[in-house]
Image: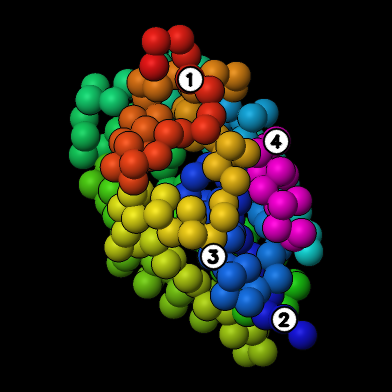
Amino acid sequence: MNKKAVCLLSGGMDSSTLAYLARNQGYDIYALHFMYGQMTEKRELACAKAIAESLNAAEFLKIPLAHFSLIGKSSLTDASMEIEDYGEGDPSLPNTYVPFRNANLLSIATSFAEARDADAIFIGVQASDYAGYPDCRPEFIDAFQKVMDIGTSQEAKIRLLSPFVKMNKTDIIKTGIKLGVPYELTWSCYKNNEEACGRCSSCHFRLEAFANAGLKDPIEYEAGL
């Protein structure tokens, strides 16, 4: 039997590359997608499904998390806040940060992994998110592994893996190209569901990564970009 991996799959560039990497390492993919009230929820869900299908995932589980919108304090989930363009706002804590989101997501992923007798959970946190996203730091990942070890049954031996944690997005793109990731099926824009805005921080870092890798991003952007 193959190893089993729960992969947090948003449908974005990083998480899609992550899932392809997990499959390349011999894992059967149990894709986990969260709908937490983000502005591009519809497009992200479609992309996550498409990536899961391309990987012949053993399971695709989508989880609605309405509480993030109720809590607020993030422009991704709070309609009263405007999503900042790259370079705007406080770089030490962008307003796209969803308070303690990764702890919420990993708690559910741990439940899913334990219920499926999975060997690992893969999460796509990476180096360029450290400054503004405290729940992407290596220390957070290490601490959550300890929580998993203590809070699951003795039979469960689930590893929390973050292979991109010390990589930048250019490194991730180059890894994904080698693995054959269909980036045309992925979505990174924080603002739009049809054509990517090209101005939000997520679009900026995605475009920068493709350019640094000497490649053209295969998704559509607003006119003039």
Q: Kindly identify the amino acid type of the residue bearing the numbered disc 4.
A: Ala
Q: Kindly identify the amino acid type of the residue bearing the numbered disc 1.
A: Tyr
In this view, the residue in front, 163 or 99, is 163
Asked whether 46 falls inside the magenta stretch, the response is yes
The secondary structure making up most of the magenta span is helix
The residue singled out by tag 1 in the image is 221
Whether 216 is drawn above or below 102: the answer is above
Residue extent of the magenta highlight: 45-57
Callout 3–callout 1 Cβ contact below 8 Å: no
Find residue 214 and report its image quarter. Answer: top left
Residue at figure coordinates x 74%, y 72% from the top left: 115
Whether 79 is drawn above or below 29: the answer is above
**Which circle, 3 or 4, is nearer the viewer?**
3
Whole-number angstrom distance, CA of label 4 to CA of label 2: 27 Å
Q: Is residue 34 left or right of residue 188?
A: right
For the image shown, how many numbered marks are present on the structure?
4
The x and y percentages for residue 31 are 68, 57
Whole-number angstrom distance, CA of label 3 to CA of label 1: 27 Å
The residue singled out by tag 3 in the image is 21
Residue at figure coordinates x 37%, y 33% from the top left: 207
The residue singled out by tag 2 in the image is 2
The residue singled out by tag 4 in the image is 46
Q: Quadrant of the C terminus?
A: top left
Q: Kindly identify the amino acid type of the residue bearing the numbered disc 2.
A: Asn
Whole-number angstrom distance, CA of label 4 to CA of label 1: 18 Å
In this view, the residue in front, 186 or 86, is 186
Residue at figure coordinates x 40%, y 22% from the top left: 198
- Of marks 4 and 2, which one's residue comes earlier in the chain? 2
Residue at figure coordinates x 59%, y 70% from the top left: 24
Find residue 202 and report its image quarter. Answer: top left
Q: Is residue 34 left or right of residue 183?
A: right
The x and y percentages for residue 96 are 39, 32
